Amino acid sequence: MYTATTRAICVTVRPQYLPDQSDPAKSQYVWAYQVRIENKGDFTVQLRSRHWKITDGLGRLQEVKGPGVVGKTPMLRPGDVFEYTSGTPLSTPSGIMGGTYQMVSESGENFDIEIPDFSLDTPTAKRNLN
């Protein structure tokens, strides 16, 4: 589990390798990751967009930007939690992901919150400190 807190918004990510959707013989590796976003602050925020940075085991960077997450732009009141699951493929048996969510407060202030960097490793991959 990987966690980061920015301005009282806590983001926790739990990655999981999916061997049934992967094909190492074809250099295809797939992970799911569960994200939990918890508003521990005293103001309401809305998630507007995401910016992921995905680096494979060879150091190749792919950036993914777009509105919301899984087709949603959740509103989080104080104490609210939003959870979703998504996934990513890589052509190497390990990599690393992280990024930011752009949030907007009730007053209209836009700010970014950190998505913690998390490691993507197959059970047989050599462990690297990315």
Image: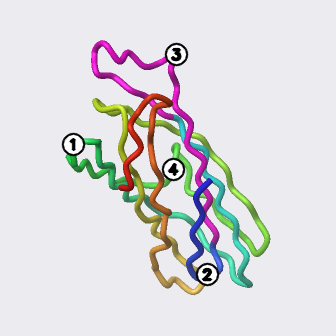
Q: Which mark is residue 58?
A: 1
Distance Cα–Cα, label 1 vs label 3: 23 Å
Instruction: Give the secondary structure at mark 3.
Output: helix
**SS class of the residue under badge 4?**
loop
First in sequence, mark 2 or 1: give its number.
1
* In contact (CB < 8 Å): disc 3 and disc 4: no
Camera-nearest label, 1 or 3: 1
- Judge from the rendering whether residue 94 lies leftward or rightward of residue 33; answer left or right: left
Residue type of the residue flagged with mark 3: Asp
Question: Where is mark 3, residue-wise?
Answer: 20
User: Disc 2 and disc 1: Cα gap in Å?
Assistant: 42 Å
User: Whole-Å distance between the Cαs marked 2 and 3?
Assistant: 43 Å
Q: Earlier in the sequence, mark 1 or mark 3?
A: 3
Residue to which mark 4 is pinned? 69
- Which colouring convention does the figure follow? rainbow
Which residues lie in the magenta part?
10-31
Mark 4 nearby-residue class (10 Å; few <14, some 14–19, many ≥20): some
Which residue is labeled 2 in the image? Answer: 106
